[in-house]
Image: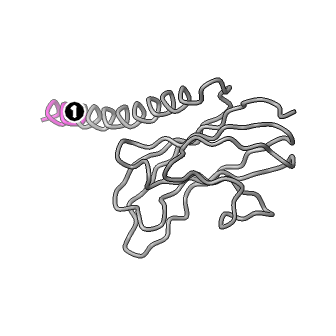
Amino acid sequence: MKKIVIALSIALLLAIAGTQEVAAQCKQQMVYKCATDGGNAIYLRDFNTKLNKLKSGEKDPGTKWTVVLNTGTRYRFILCTPPGLENKVELTLFDSQHPEENPWLKTDETRNVQDYVCRRSGMYYVSIKWKEGFGDQKTCAVGILSFVGKNQ
């Protein structure tokens, strides 16, 4: 009886460990693919997020990160999602003076790669969330922040 319990426990442990590895690979593969989409920009940071399925009428609060940007520097923001979700997720860059509703930068249907020239050094916020009207499934998304260069 003890052998059966031990065997079942090991099988359950392996099953759980196997699902965790698949999720981690998905994220790492997306980060690598997304970072290589940056062209000649230098990778600085990535923003991984899990997007949950939303209930009817629920608004996605998104996931937010803090970044420090410097005046006169050109940064590149890249948003990557699984195939088929390209136009359903948005990356937004905002600060305390320009809230999320009136951001400095927001990805749109035609461009998931956008450059931003910082006008004022300080703390900014990056948000990744479902666009309004979407969120009918659970998925993940990756944002990349890259350094392009100093503006002259």
Question: Is residue 5 in the magenta section?
Answer: yes
| Residue lying at 39% horizontally and 49% vertically, measured from the top left | 85
Q: Main secondary structure of the magenta part?
A: helix
Quadrant in which residue 17 is drawn: top left
Q: Which x, y percent locates residue 49?
A: 51, 47
The answer to whether residue 14 is left or right of residue 5 is right
Q: In the picture, which quadrant includes the N terminus?
A: top left
Could you say whether the residue bearing mark 1 is in a helix, strand or loop?
helix
Labels in figure, total? 1
| Residue lying at 44% horizontally and 46% vertically, measured from the top left | 140
Furthest residue in direction bottom, as rendered = 57
**Which segment did they paint magenta?**
1-9
12, above or below 64, in the image: above
Q: Which x, y percent locates residue 116?
A: 72, 44
Quadrant in which residue 82 is drawn: top left
125, above or below 6, in the image: below
Q: Nearer the viewer, residue 139 or 145?
A: 145
Q: Which x, y percent locates residue 52?
A: 42, 57
Q: In the picture, which quadrant includes the C terminus?
A: top right
Task: Please rate how many residues cluster around mark 1, counting C-alpha atoms within 10 Å: few if below 14, some from 14 to 19, many from 20.
Answer: few
Q: Which x, y percent locates residue 128?
A: 56, 53
Residue corresponding to mark 1: 11
The answer to whether residue 58 is left or right of residue 95 is left
Question: Is residue 46 in the magenta section?
Answer: no
